[in-house]
Image (cartoon, rainbow, N blue to C red):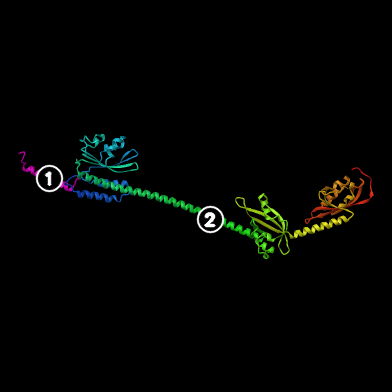
Amino acid sequence: MSQTTPSYEELISQINKLKADNKSLRLRPSIHSTDANVLNFLDLKNQLSLEALSAKTCKEVIKVCAKYLQKINNIHSVSFFEYKKKKISIIREYNLPKKFVQLINNSNDLNHLQSLLFSDRKISTNHQVSNSITDKHSKHPFHSFLNSFKSTWTIPLFEEEGRSVSLLLLSRKQYENDTFFRVLIQSLQIQIQSIFQRLLILDEIQQQSNKLTKAVEEKTQSIENMNSELLEQIKLHKEKNQYLIEEINLFKSLIHQQKDIVLRINTDGQILFHNPAFKKNIAAAKSDSNLIFSYLGEGDFPGLNTIIQDFDNGIQWVHCEIQLQTDSLDWYNFSFTPTRNKRGIITDIQVVARNIHQVKILEQKLRSQRKILINMIKSNHKVIFIMDTNGIIELVSDNCTNYTANNQPITPNEFFKKISHPDDYVMIIQNIDLLLAHKNTKWDTEFRLKGLNGNWHKQDLEINAINNSNDEIIYFFGSFSRRNIEIKKITP
């Protein structure tokens, strides 16, 4: 057979081969072929995108991508790698040489692995791995395990917070680096990257949402805690307020029920508060004045300015007796007490006035009776004296000088023992003890008293017990007078 004219059998063989090739191209389109069925490639890519929409994690997206990338004609190996914390690991691999996998898992040569699997370029493409001399990847020792593949593509997918993920595609067919080829690869890269980007954005939004939700929950919890504390404080405040109201009502009730007059005045004398006893006891209805001075009559009231000056000097209470403008001008015992603020300044004055009119009347009676008694004592020839239970003379009549030596009077606060003869005082003490024991109420005796001439003269002594309302002896009322029989001078 000539070299220019093929035989019939050769032509038939070429026709059959062309038919077979044409059928193969129609059924299994290549990603780089002018005769490829691009529609099938796009259909696979669309299916990948649709299924990836339901993915919630990067792991699920990688699983979907690996599933559809394996279906593309002349893609013989699909692998996903992760670089994190200075460590490279395989996320998912399909038809990757086992020795290559073992070396990646056991190798510490990060520099070479990074240059191969995580290229700085957007798409790292290796052609004719076993024959290429110019590409630095071809010199990598790991390429000895990739000799069965003619073309490699390293596609970076995303990089975030120190974590990088890339895709390695391997093909046993050699592809030319033309425009159509690059468009297909870039389309595939953009599609996968957009899926991951969407997922990362959703994850970031979810994280932000979680942070926001957590912050809102913490803020809500904080507000709830504050609200709970506030409610508890309000409850305690209400309880304290109720307690204070009850206390105030109690004090008001006590003040209003007091028979004593209770007032609160300012430093100018204006009445700020008064209890019902004020209106009840004084002739307030007869005066329209609101000053305390208009209700005061005779007494030892020193003046409000003097009282305030005493308070400034440290005095806490000022007491005085004053008549009030009542129908009968009754006497009252006034007590003034200052009220100060936090700075110690007097803001007002508390006044309590107690009716002592009957006491004053009794005092006047007692003074009158005492004066009458003294006059009666002076008109009596006997020496009258009052002695307490300890034998101390508290009161004695003036005529005692007529009985004592050198006209020396018997003075109050003097022991009866000093004016009596020592031998007689023993007997006097015995009789006083009998009175204190309530065995006697009075007794008569005699004792010796040193007279004007220095001699001891016998005296007739009479002592009576004075009891209080509880029948307790509080004083002895006594008297003595001289006898006519004189005895010799005795040296004590």
Question: Does residue 102 show up?
Answer: no
Q: Which mark is residue 271?
A: none
- Residue at (53% x, 55% y) in the render: 234
- Residue at (88% x, 50% y) in the render: 401
Give residue 490's position: percent from left, percent from top.
92, 44
- Residue 226 vs 1, above or below: the answer is below
228 or 419, which lies in front? 419
Number of the front mark, 1 or 2 = 2
Instruction: Name the image quarter holding the C terminus.
Output: top right
- Magenta stretch: dominant SS? helix
- Horizontally, residue 189 falls left or right of residue 220, namely left
470 or 333, which lies in front? 333
Q: Which mark is residue 18?
A: 1
Q: How many C-alpha atoms fall within 10 Å of the one at disc 2: few (<14), some, or many (≥20)?
A: few
Give residue 216's position: percent from left, percent from top.
42, 51
Query: Circle 2 is placed at which residue position?
Result: 235
Q: Looking at the rendering, which quadrant does residue 110 occupy?
A: top left
Single out the residue that lies furthest toward the bottom: 286
> Type of residue at label 2?
Lys
**Callout 2 secondary element:** helix
327 or 423, which lies in front? 327
Instruction: Name the image quarter holding the N terminus.
Output: top left
Cα gap from disc 1 to disc 2, whole angstroms: 96 Å
> Type of residue at label 1?
Leu
- Horizontally, residue 388 falls left or right of residue 179, namely right
Is 17 covered by the magenta stretch? yes
- Residue at (82% x, 55% y) in the render: 466
Q: How many C-alpha atoms fall within 10 Å of the one at disc 1: few (<14), some, or many (≥20)?
A: few
- Residue 474 vs 284, above or below: the answer is above
Give residue 42's position: percent from left, percent from top.
22, 49
Part of the protein shown in magenta: 1-30
Question: Does residue 211 show up?
Answer: yes
